[in-house]
Image (cartoon, helix red, strand yellow):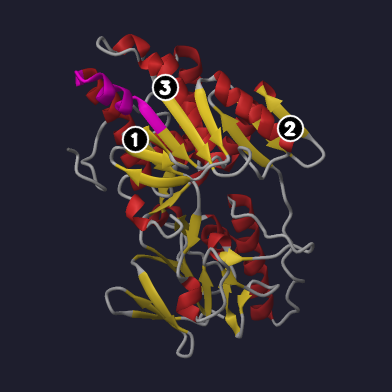
Amino acid sequence: MDDHRVVVVGGGFGGLQFVNDLKGAGTRITLVDRRNHHLFQPLLYQVATTILSTSEIAWPIRHLYSDRGDVTTLLAEVTGVDAARKQVQLRDGTTLDYDTLVLATGATHAYFGRDEWEPVAPGLKTLEDATTIRRRVLLAFERAELATDPAVRDALLTFTIIGAGPTGVELAGIIAELAHKTMPKEFRNIDTRTTKVVLVEAGPRVLPSFAEELSAYAQKALEDLGVEVRLGKPVTECSVDGVKIGETFLASRTIVWAAGVQASPAAKWLDIPADRAGRSVVGPDLTAPGLPDVFVIGDTASVKRSDGSPVPGIAPAAKQQGGYVAKVVRARLAGKTAPQAFRYRHQGSLATIGQSAAIVDFGKVKLKGWIAWWIWGLAHIYFLIGTRSRFAVAWSWLWIYLSGQHSARLITQKETMRDEG
């Protein structure tokens, strides 16, 4: 079957798992991504908050498959799919023919119809997002050191995180620790311990996908770090001067969006149904309706569990879907019966609060505190690619634990989303 052409769009967890598990199947695989690296998104917030460097959580896709002669890697952007002709359309006008297509194109942040907020409230999905947020956080302290107007200084030292899911909670905890524990000795005109970190959640509690007892523990841990948690009111306005929470204005010069996601336009490319977040509604075998040779997986797919609840948009789910589709493709190529419908196996939910506490929900087993933080850390190190990355991340965490100093506090890029002013 060496002439069977497989096109995979997206080098995230789902796409790479599929390519890895299809090794030796005798196919010709073309892997397309608009970035040249695979990103370990669960630790992206640690780049944004100066704990890790970009090279510790990202790896060149081309290097990952340098010893796979069956895999061709292309740095390109997909703009559409012609399912009738079985072609993937690229931005430069060229096309890729396929016999099997796997769309693993992920998701980006969603502003619920207020896209004009993005320049002042960036989300966190890419390395560029992370370095932009890191730059803004560090520049806020530098500008506060120079500020002579107390009101301007207070606004610079107020950081607002919108959305109290895992990303929002993790960002808020680390920024608070950075300001209250790492930086106080380094400035002369400001006391960074007066920094205000505000976590805003429209719902009634933080980490709503976790059990209530763990959610309550996380909120208490955040408040112990000095984070101000505001619940029950949505953000109604974002600007360079601050945010409006309900009807109350908060002067804040650094805002981060962690409140929602929007899937890639894969459903539009295929002209198939999508859910409210734009995720493609797929069949039990993860194929697009009416297109048995097209699979949609990961954050861009709307997949139901046996009880009707949605499969969460997390890395383990995408990896399981990629592995499942590889089994289906292998079975088809061998003329065998394909596996039963995809079944998601939840392996637990984890979130960290600062550098000393975390929560872990394994269903019947729920853990919190220091032991949960160790489990969280070991789990993340295990899933990193390569011994070098595992060692580098472990060393960075150990260094912060022993010295209290973050190792990646560099302001390195020009602002990309708004005037530096």
Measure how far apart labels 1 and 3 are at the Cα level. 15 Å
Image location (x, y in percent) of residue 110: 45, 56
Magenta segment boundaries in residue numbering: 146-159
Q: Nearer the viewer, residue 302 or 11?
A: 302
Measure how far apart labels 2 and 3 are at the Cα level. 27 Å
Q: Residue furthest front?
A: 247
Measure how far apart labels 1 and 2 are at the Cα level. 31 Å
Task: Residue at 42%, 57% (x, y): give it.
Answer: 66
Question: Could one spot residue 286 in this view of the protein?
Answer: yes
Q: Nearer the viewer, residue 307 or 327?
A: 307
Q: Which residue is labeled 3 in the image?
A: 178
Q: Which residue is labeled 1 in the image?
A: 254
Image location (x, y in percent) of residue 243: 38, 40
Q: Which residue is labeled 2 in the image?
A: 213
Magenta run includes residue 184:
no
Image quadrant of residue 205? top right
